[in-house]
Image (cartoon, rainbow, N blue to C red):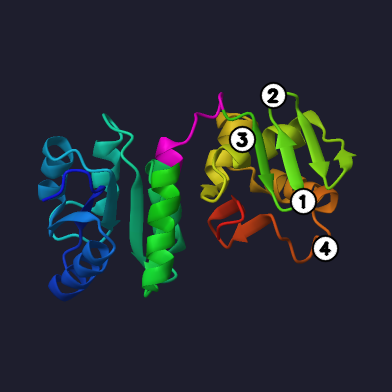
Amino acid sequence: MNSDKPKILLIEDDPSFRQLLATTLENQDYAVSALSSGREGLNAARNEHPSLLILDLGLPDLDGQEVIRRLRLWTKLPIIVLSARDQENDITQALDNGADDYLTKPFGNAELLSRIKALLRRVTAPSANEQMSFQAGDLRIELGKRRLFVGEREVHLTPIEFRLLAELVRNAGFVVTHRQLLEKVWGPSYVEHSHYLRIYMGQLRHKLEADPTRPRYLLTEAGVGYRLSDGEN
């Protein structure tokens, strides 16, 4: 096996689906370790040093949520969660537990490969402190200088609006749950106050978007959270 290939750890209990995913990934020049249980996956995460984990939540031994919680005690390994369609509570919980992204079944191979590439890019990109600016389309954000431009026009943001936008910038291209945003921007005692997010996201969209009713940048993930488009998705 070529050790230069990014290694993907795949934990999926359905044999045919597991084989299909593994073949798809191997055809894209990834090295794949495909396993069927949570405990096997946890051992492999420690011993095989994968670049990324793809995790089905419905496993025969450990619940996928427990696998995420245990991993996050000791590693920042990027995790993409697979979930049955419409299980919004499971998706939100997985992201709050520390997963980086999710896909609902069924999904297209192109979408999966795009998410993998985006996550691997983020792992090798400069840290949030080093990457002080963000640009997508005509939107430019300078975190260090706390400045926002839409085209050539500078837009004024309130302190809370900027903190909210900065948190989305740090996770550009990936969904951030309501709970994560509320805790980061307002504090742990505000995690149930989801109406704060609706109000401030509405304000941000009116300032950033050409058509706030059809946002290009500040995207809603229904029942889960928000995603700042990075121009890749």
Residue 167, image x, y percentages = 61, 36
Q: Return the disc, 3 or 4, that comes first in the chain's sequence.
A: 3
As helix, strand or loop, the secondary structure at mark 3 comes to helix
Between 228 and 31, the one lying in front of the other is 31
In the image, 44: left or right of 108? left
Mark toward the viewer: 3 or 4 = 4
Q: Return the disc, 4 or 2, that comes first in the chain's sequence.
A: 2
Q: Is residue 77 above or below residue 146?
A: below
Identify the residue under disc 1: 138
- Asked if marks 3 and 1 touch (Cβ < 8 Å), the reply is no
In the rendered structure, which amino acid carries the disc numbered 2? Gly
Between 209 and 109, the one lying in front of the other is 109
Type of secondary structure dominating the magenta stretch: loop
Q: Residue at x 87, y 38 (%)?
A: 154
Quote the CA–CA distance across marks 3 and 2.
26 Å
Q: Please report the bounds of the magenta region as a residue range.
A: 122-130
In the rendered structure, which amino acid carries the disc numbered 4? Asp
Name which quarter of the figure residue 232 lies in: bottom right
Q: Is residue 2 above or below residue 128?
A: below
